[in-house]
Image (cartoon, rainbow, N blue to C red):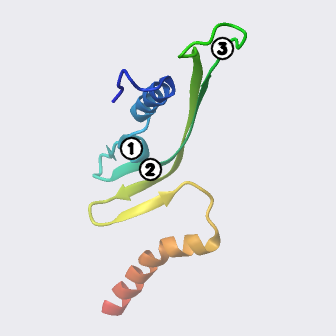
Amino acid sequence: MILENDHPIERIMDNALIKIRSFVDADTVVGTPVTTNDGMSIIPISRVSMGFLTGGGEYSDLSAEQKSEFPFAGGSGAGVSVQPIGFLVSDGKSIKLVNINEKNPLEKLMDITPDIVDAIVGKVKK
């Protein structure tokens, strides 16, 4: 909330943060689900990084008559990075995270372990 008696730097910061919030919300991190014809749901997952900077100061010609309030100069800047990291895939029975980044062999093994266990249990039951 922006108040009239706030310092100008506070108004700049509040305005910038309001704008940033409009860019980054939960739908940015966890995307809108897409359902395929065979009933699978695919949900994109992203990593959001954000940086923010605000600065300002009062300035005056010191040789001029002293004033009770000096003119203010300020500005702000922000950067937002959205990087896709994977997809949640659901077939209605299970959910898997499909990572789009390169994996080391141990991560690949961890991903396929549930499938291996299911195959072994299925053979043992027969």
Q: Marks 2 and 3, Cα distance to the nearest angstrom?
A: 50 Å
Q: Nearer the viewer, residue 90 or 57?
A: 57
Q: Which mark is residue 45?
A: 2
Q: Tell me residue 35's x, y (percent).
A: 31, 46
Q: Which mark is residue 31?
A: 1
Left or right? Give the position of 125 relative to 68.
left
Q: Quadrant of residue 27?
A: top left
Q: Nearer the viewer, mark 3 or mark 1?
A: 3
Residue placed under numbered mark 3 in the picture: 60
Residue 28 lies left or right of residue 104; in this view the side is left
Label 1 SS: loop
Is 122 above or below relative to 100?
below
Number of marks drawn:
3
Lower position in the chain sequence, tag 3 or tag 1: 1
Residue type pointed to by label 2: Ile
Kind of residue sitting beneath label 3: Ser
Mark 2 Cα shell of 10 Å, populated few (<14), some (14-19), many (≥20): many
Q: Earlier in the sequence, mark 1 or mark 2?
A: 1
Nearest to the observer: residue 61 or residue 108: 61
Is there any visible trace of residue 14 in the rendered image? yes
